[in-house]
């Protein structure tokens, strides 16, 4: 198995260029069964360095299934469901804060129970995200909603703010749960299942904690980013720009709509006061006034929805992109370290001695990082496409609903306006 | 049938004899330059009035209509003549002299082509209103306004209506001195005030709302641009985004038509804003006739009083003559006799005058109230129609909105 021989670069487990069958995954059951203590075998770690509990063979093979490259995690194959709901306010003498209920349903054996229900606050989510970034530095970690809010400007306890935040937190956990690597992270497991998150110490779940593999080496200069990653970086820059523009446009529309709403609110009542000194025209005018009032409510709903549902998602993606750019930079660092060390070795006089393991380790890291990143990138692109499709069709839907409400109001007014013509024969 | 013009809500059910005879329209507008009264160059707009005998269209032949050009000031002259000559009629108003209640995109410039076009429609509407009025339609001056290009102005001045116009100024002051105005007219005047106030408010707010609506639609056009730029950096998402962007552009562009249609609605409201003024003018004229009657009656009463005093020798009312005669001695019986005789004549004349004025008043009240009732019916009908077409316009706007967003949604779903 060329994959495991020392001295040659390990084949990329998640290269995306080979078919599933051809790829020998380091965790394939045959390997561990065949070479339990082989010197050639490295510690069973995931390509990203996280140790894996392989005490039960069953878990390894099922892990293999789950680590399929083609992760079409639709309802049938998904075995982990997470939701965030039921926000509650907690008041203590020290502080006031909101907690959210986090419900988990799973058939995974990594979890002791099939169901969990815990309460978590934003701080806990923040802790989780930091832990994920630390322990899975080669992966793209989904973003959290913004941490800080201006105390005077935004009401942290208003229904709208809490609901917006809840949705974002729910999305965050779902994205992690859908990720083939992140969802198996022990911190994630603890977050979902532990009664009390003991955030200070490491978790006792796994003895083989594994050194928090330090990938952020720093100080090495990268000559050139490989084309594919440069393309990612360029795309992210351009995409951020576009998102910023869309954000500004959406805000401007909300502003214009709010000002239009203000005028509408004044317009309707004038018809009402007119109706007060008309006889024949009393009902039609009153009807117009009522109609405008309905349109006003519909517009208010539209504006609120856009504020609460549309803008936060845009901003979330901007944050996502920021963290992705950081991951790209980390990757650059890892590659830089490798290249520098390789160069140092290459320029040694004795070219016959094998490449020292240090350089080898660096090479591994680079290749694993690249593989993880590429896989995550593809996943991210796919999700992005779905998310924006959903976001924009949602925007279209909200506008359609607004116009449908107004249409209904005006259509129901027509008979009221025409009433006299019909009643002419009957009344005086 | 009669061509009803752009606003299309003129009631011609009663079918005046004029309208049975001819079709009237204001077909075009043109710019002219010429020398004005003080020999200065000026630019002004003229409007083409076309008249066509009714039978011509039905016979199948389509002869060239008779036509002549008139400027706005001539329309004003016509209307002033009608106001003075038919004080008991609610005279149809002209379209506004200057553009008011404009929202920012519209120009307030009288020479602006959109303003000129809307004025053309308003002038046509004015002519049709007059032509369908039971009293005004048979006026000779009106007829020659429509048919005689040259010398019309002189003809109008020859009627001497301007002398009568001065009495209108009196009408402005009459309010405070009338003791017994007809209650119905007082109520009508009050109604006119309220109508004017509420429509002004309505037009103001509408203009502001139009401004805002314009902004909402136009900003969506920016989505078109950014979606296009964004699609350039996407692979699979690109097509959907690009085509959605086109729909956003279409959405932004659609507001121009929407607001143009709304302008018609505003014009319909404006007509009744000015009609309120015409209504108030009739009520004031009533007050004037009532006032003049009351003055005549008052005068008669005082003359009668004087006669009584002179006859019985008692002074009940203070008069300077009376005092001086008291101070400087009584008059001779001959003088008294002469005075009495004069008073008798004056009383006779006074009674005639009171009878006349009373008849005038009654006549005015009768005619004016008929026209006011006619106006009320017309107003109720027209405004109801205006509201219906406004609602239909809103419905159309909503349907267009739904269509555009559905189109965009389809594109988004293909992303």
Image (cartoon, grey):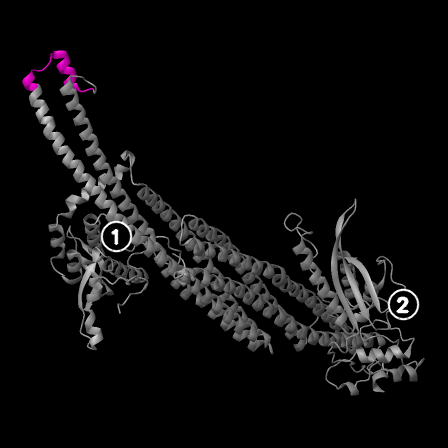
Residue located at (27% from left, 42% from top): B284
Residue A219 in view of the camera: no
Q: Residues within 10 Å of mark 2 (few under 14, many from 20)?
A: few
Q: Up-down: is B68 above or below B231?
A: above
Q: Secondary structure at mark 1?
A: loop
Is residue A18 found left or right of B115 in the rendered image?
A: right
Q: Is residue B296 above or below residue B22?
A: above
Q: Quick check: can you spot residue B220?
A: yes
Q: Label 1 crowding class (10 Å Cα cut-off): few <14, some 14-19, many 20+?
A: many
Q: Are marks 1 and 2 on the same chain?
A: no
User: Residue B313: x and y, percent?
Assistant: 15, 17
Main SS class of the magenta portion in the image: helix
On screen, residue B240 above or below A207: below
Which residue in the structure is indicated by mark 1?
A: B91
Toward which corner of the image does residue B110 lie, by quadrant?
A: bottom left
Q: Nearest the camera: A365 or B169?
A: B169
Mark 1 and mark 2: span between their CA atoms? 96 Å
Residue A361 image-quadrant placement:
bottom right
Residue B415, percent across and down? 60, 76
> Mark 1 — on which chain does it sit?
B
- The stretch of residues the image draws in magenta is B318-335
State which chain disc 2 sits on.
A
Q: Is residue B321 magenta?
A: yes
Q: Which residue is mark 2?
A: A206
Q: Nearer the viewer, residue B260 or A196?
A: B260
Q: Quadrant of the N terminus of chain B?
A: bottom left
Horizontal side, residue A389 vs residue A27: left or right: left
């Amino acid at each position: 198995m060329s994959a495991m021989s020392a001295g040659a670069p390990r084949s990329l487990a998640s290269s995306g260029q080979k078919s599933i069958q051809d790829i020998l995954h380091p965790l394939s059951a045959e390997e561990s069964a065949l070479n339990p203590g082989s010197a050639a075998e490295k510690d069973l770690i995931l390509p990203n360095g996280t140790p894996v509990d392989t005490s039960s063979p069953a878990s390894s093979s099922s892990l293999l299934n789950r680590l399929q490259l083609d992760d079409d995690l639709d309802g049938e194959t998904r075995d982990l469901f997470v939701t965030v709901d039921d926000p509650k306010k907690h008041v203590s003498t020290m502080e006031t804060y909101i907690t959210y209920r986090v419900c988990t349903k799973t058939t995974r054996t990594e979890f002791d129970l099939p169901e969990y229900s815990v309460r978590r606050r934003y701080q806990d989510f923040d802790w989780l995200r930091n832990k994920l970034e630390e322990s899975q530095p080669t992966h793209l970690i989904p973003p959290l909603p913004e941490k800080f809010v201006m105390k005077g400007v935004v009401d942290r306890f208003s229904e709208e703010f809490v609901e917006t935040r809840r949705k974002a937190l729910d999305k965050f956990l779902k994205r992690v749960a859908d990720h083939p690597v992140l969802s198996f992270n022990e911190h994630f497991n603890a977050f979902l299942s532990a009664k009390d998150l003991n955030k200070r110490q490491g978790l006792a779940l796994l003895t083989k904690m594994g050194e928090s593999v330090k990938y952020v080496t720093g100080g090495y200069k990268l000559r050139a980013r490989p084309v594919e990653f440069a393309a990612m970086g360029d795309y992210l820059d351009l995409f951020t720009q576009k998102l910023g523009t869309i954000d500004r446009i959406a805000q401007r529309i909300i502003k214009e709509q709010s000002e239009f709403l203000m005028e509408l609110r004044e317009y309707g009542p004038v018809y009402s006061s007119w109706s007060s000194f008309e006889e024949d025209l009393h009902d039609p005018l009153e009807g117009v006034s009522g109609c405008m009032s309905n349109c006003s409510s519909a517009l208010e709903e539209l504006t609120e929805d856009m504020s609460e549902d549309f803008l936060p998602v845009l901003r979330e993606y901007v944050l996502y992109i920021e963290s992705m750019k950081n991951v790209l930079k980390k990757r650059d660092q890892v590659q830089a370290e490798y290249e520098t060390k390789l160069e140092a070795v290459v320029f040694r006089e004795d070219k016959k001695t094998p490449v020292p393991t240090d350089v080898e380790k660096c090479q591994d890291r680079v290749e694993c990082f690249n593989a993880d990143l590429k896989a995550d990138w593809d996943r991210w692109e796919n999700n992005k496409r779905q998310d924006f499709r959903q976001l924009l069709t949602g925007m279209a839907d909200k506008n359609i609903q607004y116009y449908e409400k107004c249409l209904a109001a005006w259509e129901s007014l027509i008979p009221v306006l025409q009433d006299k013509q019909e009643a002419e024969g009957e009344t005086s | 049938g009669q061509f009803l013009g752009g606003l299309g809500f003129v009631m011609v059910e009663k079918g005046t004899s004029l309208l049975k005879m001819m079709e009237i329209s204001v077909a075009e507008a043109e710019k002219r330059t010429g020398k004005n009264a003080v020999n200065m160059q000026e630019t002004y707009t003229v409007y083409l009035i076309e008249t066509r005998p009714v039978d011509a269209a039905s016979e199948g032949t389509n002869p060239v209509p008779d036509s002549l050009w008139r400027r706005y000031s001539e329309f004003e002259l016509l209307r002033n003549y009608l106001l003075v000559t038919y004080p008991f009629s609610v005279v149809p108003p002209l379209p506004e002299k200057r553009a008011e209640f404009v929202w920012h995109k519209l120009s307030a410039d009288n020479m602006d082509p959109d303003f000129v076009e809307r004025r053309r429609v308003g002038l046509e509407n004015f002519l049709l209103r007059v032509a369908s009025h039971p009293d005004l339609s048979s006026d000779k001056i009106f007829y020659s306004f429509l048919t005689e290009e040259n010398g019309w102005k002189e003809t109008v001045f020859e009627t001497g209506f301007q002398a009568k116009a001065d009495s209108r100024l009196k009408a402005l002051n009459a309010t405070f001195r009338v003791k017994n105005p007809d209650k119905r007219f007082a109520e009508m005047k009050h109604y006119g005030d309220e109508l004017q106030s509420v429509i002004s408010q309505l037009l103001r707010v509408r203009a502001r709302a139009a401004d805002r609506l314009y902004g909402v639609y136009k900003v969506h056009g920016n989505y078109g641009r950014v979606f296009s730029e964004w699609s350039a950096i996407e692979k699979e998402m690109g097509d959907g985004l690009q085509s959605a962007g086109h729909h956003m552009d279409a959405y932004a562009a659609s507001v121009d038509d929407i607001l143009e249609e709304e302008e018609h609605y505003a014009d319909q409201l404006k007509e009744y804003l000015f009609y309120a003024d015409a209504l108030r003018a009739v009520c004031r004229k009533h007050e004037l006739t009532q006032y003049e009657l009351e003055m005549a009656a008052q005068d008669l009463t005082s003359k009668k009083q004087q006669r009584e005093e002179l006859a019985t020798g008692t002074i009940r009312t203070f008069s300077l003559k009376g005092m001086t005669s008291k101070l400087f001695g009584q008059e001779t019986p001959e003088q008294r006799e002469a005075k009495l005789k004069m008073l008798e004549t004056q009383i006779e004349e006074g009674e005639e005058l009171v009878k006349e004025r009373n008849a005038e008043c009654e006549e005015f009240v009768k005619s004016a109230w008929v026209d006011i009732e006619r106006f009320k019916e017309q107003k109720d009908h027209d405004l109801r129609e205006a509201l219906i077409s406004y609602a239909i316009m809103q419905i159309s706007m909503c349907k267009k909105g739904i269509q555009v967003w559905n189109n965009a949604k389809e594109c988004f779903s293909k992303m």
